[in-house]
Amino acid sequence: MILMNYALEIRDLRFSYPGMPPVVEGFSLTLAEGEIGCLLGSSGCGKTTALRCIAGLEPAHAGEIRLRGEVVSRPGMTVPTEARRVGVVFQDYALFPHLDILDNVAFGLRGQPRARRRERAAELLALVGLPGTGAKYPHELSGGQKQRVALARALAPSPRLLLLDEPFSNLDGDLRERLSLEVRGILKAQGTTALLVTHDQHEAFAMADTVGVMRKGRIEQWDTAYNLYHRPASRFVADFVGEGAFIEGRASDGDGIDTVLGELKHCPGCELKPGMPVSLLLRPDDVQHDDDAILKAEVVKKAFRGAEFLYTLKLEDGKQLLSLVPSHHNHAIGERIGIKLDVDHVVAFPRVEGADD
């Protein structure tokens, strides 16, 4: 029984192509009004297919989709795309080359008086930071400007849900991150509920309130970026989000873990039994450089990041760790440096035989 209406609610969605295993299966999520969500995953995980089912571009084969409490998809019943009041922003912009920018934005307002359409289109162009561009044509704009126009066009009819399919993948890295933050600000100012699909973690974390890490057609964890990074619900999420390395350990009494780097205390929620072999996740900021430390590791790679170096370090047993070190500590490859652990969030999972740590 559904006790409250969300902007978007999906229960046990399933979709498969003829003769193929399910692309999406057991897929569920909820989005509150004004919330920005994101489906994050690698190519082939089913995130774009899920988005197409929500938009009505693909018919779901099982499960239920509700928009503001209204059922728009269940077995045997599918509301057409045009009747769902869902806006879609594609990665290739999909602008009409023969229409000027104002008419591109106003395209979704057919049926309204021409003056009102043009007035609304001008309002949206100003909102996305492109005032005075209405008379230009798509070929006269940069990639970032085209994506802003596509966003304005999708927002023009005031959709009850906005879907964004890899919207910044054609842009360079700096512009992608900046535009992600700007688009988030625009959507929040409008109170627009949105769902983004991307393979880019920086983009996901810059834009979304809640992120779902997808694997094999399912959401592995639907959570804040902070919790995905510091409190991953599974080994897959821990490995997928952010950077880090796993080392072997063994659970001790009192929620402790013994490792080759020393004992770590407190692993709340890990559900580890004393003596159990575990895989312990260490993020680059967990491994600190300390000249006075007894434990030494060899620098095998280094990447300059301005204020910091990201060092790849090799331990005596051959295991490798990552460490973020202030850039005034400039060590040569092959040099041995002292390290110590400073772990605020202990993340460990029961060790699976044959797992690649």
Image (spheres, grey):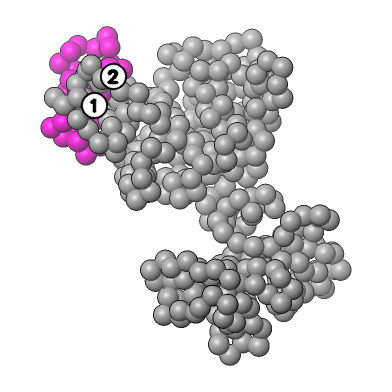
310 vs 247, left or right, is left
By secondary structure, the bulk of the magenta-drawn segment is best described as helix
The image quadrant of residue 136 is: top left
| Magenta region | 105-134
As drawn, the residue found furthest toward the front would be 334
Q: Return the residue at label 2.
A: 96
- Front residue of 71 and 336: 336
First in residue order: circle 1 vs circle 2? 2
- Front residue of 167 and 228: 167
The residue depicted at 32 percent of the width and 47 percent of the height is 175
Q: Amino acid at mark 2?
A: Phe
Q: Return the residue at label 1.
A: 138
Question: Residue 327, labelled with which disc?
Answer: none
Q: Residues within 10 Å of mark 2 (few under 14, many from 20)?
A: some
Q: Quadrant of the N terminus?
A: top right
Q: How many marks?
A: 2
Do callouts 1 and 2 mark residues in contact (Cβ within 8 Å)?
yes
- Secondary structure at numbered mark 2: loop
